[in-house]
Image: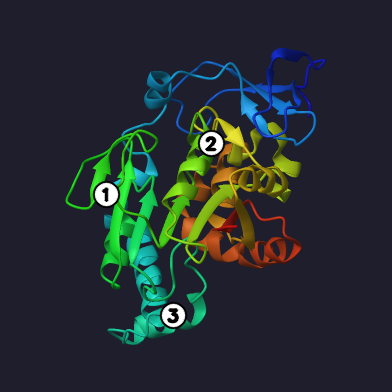
Amino acid sequence: MNNIKSKKNINHLKCFICGGAFCYLFSQKDFIYFISKKYFDLYECDSCKLVKILPEPTLDEIKSFYPKNYYVHNVDYEKSFIGWLYNCSIDASLNKHYKVPQPNLFYFFLAQFLKNLVVGAPLYPPKANGRFLDIGCGYGYWVERLQSHGWIAQGIDIMGKPSERIVIADFLEYEYEEKFEFIRMSGVLEHVIAPEKFIEKIGSLLLNNDSICQISIPQTDSFGYKYFKEDWIGFEVPRHLHSFNIDNLSVLFERYNMRIVDVSYNTSGGAFIHQLSLKWKMRFVVKLWVFFYFLFIPIDLLLKKMKKSVDVTLTVKKI
């Protein structure tokens, strides 16, 4: 990487996954939302290759890194054309999997082409107690959709507005009286201070050995990371405190008596479009999002086949 300094060890801190030493990688600032002008130092474990911001920000600092229009809390997104098209695509795909009649031909054709669009959510009716939990649920997008397909859906987030099915609280501190058949945690693990505690608690909340947790993360073993390096959108400094790969997460899950039973390499053309607009300061790319999204589909599919996608979804079960 062009701006790597001579590596310096943080001798007093060891990797929470493997116990390895952290070596300085590079420094970066928030070039996505420009919330902070501060440069943050990223370190890499010399053994398992976990990447981590050090020194770690406090919880209050972390909360200040999120703009009011952060996408998972942005209800207005659904009012845009892109939001409407995305919602139609998700609904069509879920209808197909749940064998719900499509309301019109538009949805029917969307479902044929985009039936595999949904990741990190159950694509089948409940088989046990029917309880679904979305950790980091934002404004409740998946809670609402899964509730309409027969699940007893709940969500939790540290920010946002509470509702009948959404709790605003720290996941690690909130006490659940029930266990869950399916737990979803998409784009969350990289944001939290103590990922190992999240994984331990998730294991305790799974109903049985057939219950599933699906976790989606950006992976450092991706083409985007190798090409864009310190400007890789998957780092999203300073909101992403950690950056994982499948191997180091596998070690972490096994520590808490869970194992990865499946890996889905996600298509993520939207990430490429955003990445290009930031890297080369081509804001017009975002305005022509739909055009560029379809333009990148062949590249997306190739990276998926090569297992080099930006995002992956891990299906995890208790051992």
SS type, badge 1 = helix
Q: What's the residue at 33%, 67% (across, down)?
A: 129
Q: Is residue 270 visible?
A: yes
Q: Choose between 140 and 46: the one closer to the eye.
A: 46
302 on left or right of 96 = right
Q: Relative to 137, say whether 243 is above or below.
A: above
Residues packed near mark 2 inside 10 Å, few (<14), some (14 to 19) or many (20 plus)? some
Disc on res. 195: 2
Point out the frontmost of discs 2 and 3. 2
Disc on res. 76: 1
Q: Label 3 sits on what residue type?
A: Ala
Q: Earlier in the sequence, mark 2 or mark 3?
A: 3
Q: Earlier in the sequence, mark 3 or mark 1?
A: 1
Q: Choose between 218 and 261: the one closer to the eye.
A: 261
The x, y position of residue 172, in whole percent, is 40, 35
Residues packed near mark 3 inside 10 Å, few (<14), some (14 to 19) or many (20 plus)? many
Q: What's the residue at 60%, 57% (across, down)?
A: 319
Q: Verify CB contact (< 8 Å) between mark 3 and mark 1.
A: no
Disc on res. 253: none
Point out the frontmost of discs 3 and 1. 3
185 on left or right of 315 = left
Residues packed near mark 1 inside 10 Å, few (<14), some (14 to 19) or many (20 plus)? few
Q: Label 2 sits on what residue type?
A: Pro
Q: Verify CB contact (< 8 Å) between mark 2 and mark 3.
A: no
The x, y position of residue 297, in whole percent, is 61, 66
Q: CA distance from mark 1 to mark 2?
A: 30 Å
Q: Label 1 sits on what residue type?
A: Asp
Q: Earlier in the sequence, mark 1 or mark 2?
A: 1
Q: What residue is shown with label 3?
A: 111
